[in-house]
Amino acid sequence: QVQLVESGGGSVQAGGSLSLSCAASGDPHTYCMGWFRQAPGKEREGVAIVLNGKTKYADSVKGRFTISKDIAKNTLYLQMNSLKPEDTAMYYCAANLLTQLWIGCSNPADFGYWGQGTQVTVSS
């Protein structure tokens, strides 16, 4: 099992930056980890995923967001630049301990462990 604790959310004006962190404790084999977000009235969507050092991004955040992982600290990060009002959502960190393949490391249903979420609000 793994426990995930996010931090770093907040409020920022459009064009600003925020950095999120997700500290993982417990099982160190967090090969597949990702950031997801959910806005009110919308489904949870993938933002960025890292699998064994390789990354994937949603088209809506490419070039603006960067996902990274400190293996020694077992901590996941999301650097968000050029934020837009449409980025406003609750952001969740997630992990899947069962796979080292992209199949099974892509959709919210693939992830069995979730953090409590951190709110990101971008004002225009």
Image (tube, rainbow, N blue to C red):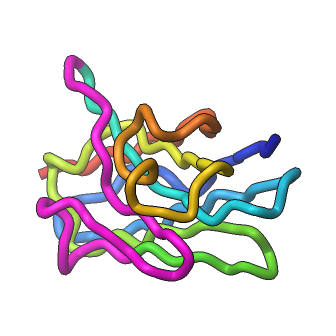
Q: Is residue 6 magenta?
A: no
Q: Residue furthest right?
A: 26
At which x and y percent is residue 103?
A: 39, 54
Note whether 111 is above or below 39 in the view shown.
below
Residue drawn at 13 percent across, 63 percent down? 59
Q: Which of these two is toward me, 17 or 95?
A: 95
- Residue 20: x, y in percent? 52, 62
Residue 7 in the image, given as x and y percentages of width and height = 62, 53
The location of residue 19, given as percent across then percent down, is 48, 68
Magenta stretch contains residue 42: yes
**Number of marks present in the image shown:** 0
Question: Which residue lies at the image location 73% right of the left edge and 58% below the top edge?
Answer: 23
Side (left or right) of 66 relative to 30: left
Q: Quadrant of residue 107?
A: top left
Left or right relative to 35: residue 59: left
| Quarter of the rendering occupied by the N terminus | top right
Residue pictured at 84% horizontal, 54% vertical: 27
| Image vertical order of residue 32 relative to residue 89, above or below | below
User: In this image, 81 relative to 109: left or right?
Assistant: left
Q: Residue at x 50, y 69 (%)?
A: 51
Say which of 124 and 60 sits in front: 60
Task: Specify start and end residues of the magenta stretch as a single range.
Answer: 41-66
Q: Is residue 48 left or right of residue 53?
A: left
